[in-house]
Image (cartoon, rainbow, N blue to C red):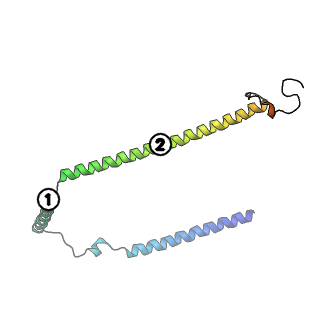
Amino acid sequence: MNQIIKDFGKGMKQLGQETVEKLIEETGKIAESVITAQELLGDIKPLSEQEMAQKKAEEERKKQKEISDVRSRISGRNIEGEIKQISNQKKQEEEEKERNFLENLRKQREVERQEQIANYDEMMGNSNKHHKDKGGNKRKTQQPDQSQMSQTAEFKGKID
């Protein structure tokens, strides 16, 4: 048993060493394949003041054009009406969710109430059986008429 534990420990140590060696090799390969920024962008040089101004002016023109396009699309629409419509729609959805929640809650409570009634009836039914077995709570029934009686002295009356 002790030898198995030692062999297991040696095996784990060897596995760890191999893993570290592989990791070092792979890290070396990655480091060799890394491209520096200088190699990647070697021929790019900084912009002059004039070129920077031109770029900014071009970006400003694009921005103004986009703004005018958006305004032209908006001008034909009733934004306030659309906002009211969206808010009303969201309000209706929330009210519908609330109604559904309350309806589900009501149904759940009704089911629970029916279960409680059934459990109570069952409990009381067992209780009544228990009392009947003991002979308690028996109701008197009507006396049967003479035709239902046997010929033995069950019926009080004239003796023949």
Q: Relative to 115, does residue 89 appear above or below in the rendering?
A: below
Q: Nearer the viewer, residue 139 or 59?
A: 139
Picture quadrant where residue 66 is located: bottom left
Q: Earlier in the sequence, mark 1 or mark 2?
A: 1
Residue position for label 1: 76
Front one among 71 and 90: 90
Is residue 111 found left or right of 160 in the rendered image? left
* Amino acid type assigned to the residue bearing label 1 in the image: Gly
Element class at badge 2:
helix
- The residue beneath circle 2 is 105
> With 117 as the anchor, is 58 left or right in this view?
left
Count of number-bearing discs: 2
Quarter of the image where one finds residue 120: top right
Q: Position of residue 106 (x, y in %)?
A: 47, 41
Marks 1 and 2: which is nearer the front? 2
Q: Point out residue 157 in the picture as x, y percentages from the top left corner.
A: 84, 24
The answer to the question of whether label 1 and label 2 lie on touching residues, with beta carbons closer than 8 A, is no
Of the residues shown, which amino acid type is indicated by label 2?
Leu
Q: Residues within 10 Å of mark 2 (few under 14, many from 20)?
A: few
Looking at the figure, which quarter contains the N terminus?
bottom right
With 125 as the anchor, is 86 left or right in this view? Answer: left
What whole-number distance in Å separates the C-alpha atoms at marks 1 and 2?
Answer: 46 Å
The image shows residue 20 at horizontal and vertical percentages of: 53, 69
Q: Residue furthest left?
A: 50
Identify the element where label 1 is drawn.
Answer: loop
Quadrant (top left/top right/bottom left/bottom right) for the C terminus: top right
Q: Is residue 96 above or below residue 117?
A: below
How many neighbours does mark 1 have within 10 angstroms: few (below 14), some (14-19), or many (20 or more)? few
- Identify which residue, 50 or 90, lies in the foreground: 90
Residue at the image point whose x is 48% and y is 74% from the top: 25
Residue 71 image offset from top left, x and y in percent = 14, 59
Q: Is residue 57 above or below residue 96?
A: below
